[in-house]
Amino acid sequence: MRNSADSTENQPNIRILLIDDDPKLCRLVTDYLKPLGFDVSSAHTGPEGLREALQGGYQAVILDCMLPGMDGFEVLRQLRRTSSVPVLMLTALGDESDRIVGLELGADDYLPKTFSTRELLARLRAVTRRSAITASAVAAQEAAAADQITVNGLWLDMAARRAALDGRPLLLTALEFDLLWCLARAPERVLSRDQLLQAISGRDYEVFDRSIDVHISALRRKLGDDPKKPKYIKTVRSAGYMLLREGEQ
């Protein structure tokens, strides 16, 4: 059986999953949290709770240790294989072993079954706040990583417009950097002069078809690349240029 609280008006609710076999406790928690901006769903067995938690969309899970069908520790163990949703364990009063096992399995916090509603609210807000901060940091790291390329010993950072070869900084002109960036985004793919021109168009460069060759030659000198036996930039006759992956010629 699954019970859901309605959304608080003009405010997106924090979705919470409560896994406990006591329907009365579930109703009390739901009634308390609903006016405070929480949308509480309930599951009353271990397997049911695990299925619901794995569907995602919850900002936190309140998980009882003792459940029919599958205990809370096994639910947590299986949940942690694929999910990092914050989990608040409910333990018997004074049962330190339950708390230790739960934390070792990946629980974020715990509460005794005799918890007060104010303590429940404080701990819920704490774990969801930490989770939001972590998610924000991960998103920032992923965004930064999307602006960086590493291939064949070359490292390029578009946001900082920096480049390095085997850890040694490369001093590139703005146009040289953009050309190298275009090639590095598509290693092993031949890019014609027209494609390179189009990729750097609108960047206030005075560049034309054959001048691409001049700038590629300058790039090769700075990379220490031999056009006859290229390690980095290969000329494909009548087609264009290609950045090689490591160990290819």
Image: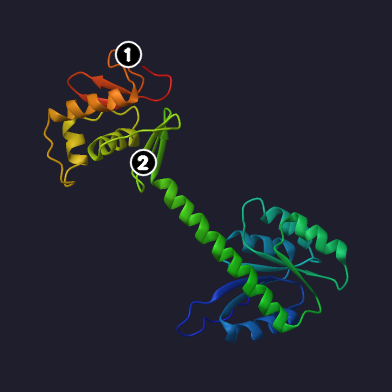
Residue extending farthest to the top is 228
Image quadrant in which you'd find residue 220: top left
State the residue at coordinates (72%, 70%). 44
Distance of mark 1 from mark 2, alpha carbons? Answer: 26 Å
**One can see residue 102 in this view:** yes
Q: Residue at coordinates 45% horizontally, 32% vertically from top-left? A: 167
Front position in the image: 248 or 162 = 162
Count all numbered tags in the image, as a single digit: 2
Crowd class of label 2 (few under 14; some 14 to 19; many from 20; radius 10 Å): some
Q: Circle 1 is placed at which residue position?
A: 229
Quick check: 15 left or right of 140? right
Q: Is residue 159 left or right of residue 196?
A: right
Q: Report whether 221 appears left or right of 90.
A: left
Name the image quarter holding residue 103.
Answer: bottom right
Specify the quadrant that holds the C terminus: top left
Q: Residue 76 location, x and y as percent?
A: 72, 58
Which corner quadrant holds the N terminus?
bottom right
Residue at (73%, 59%) from the top-left corner? 75
Mark toward the start of the polypeptide (1 vs 2)? 2
Closer to the camera in the image, 69 or 158? 158
Looking at the rendered structure, the secondary structure element under dot 1 is loop
Q: What residue type is labelled 2?
A: Arg
> Badge 2 is on which residue?
162
Report the residue at 56% width, 74% height from top. Answer: 14
Left or right relative to 69: residue 14: left
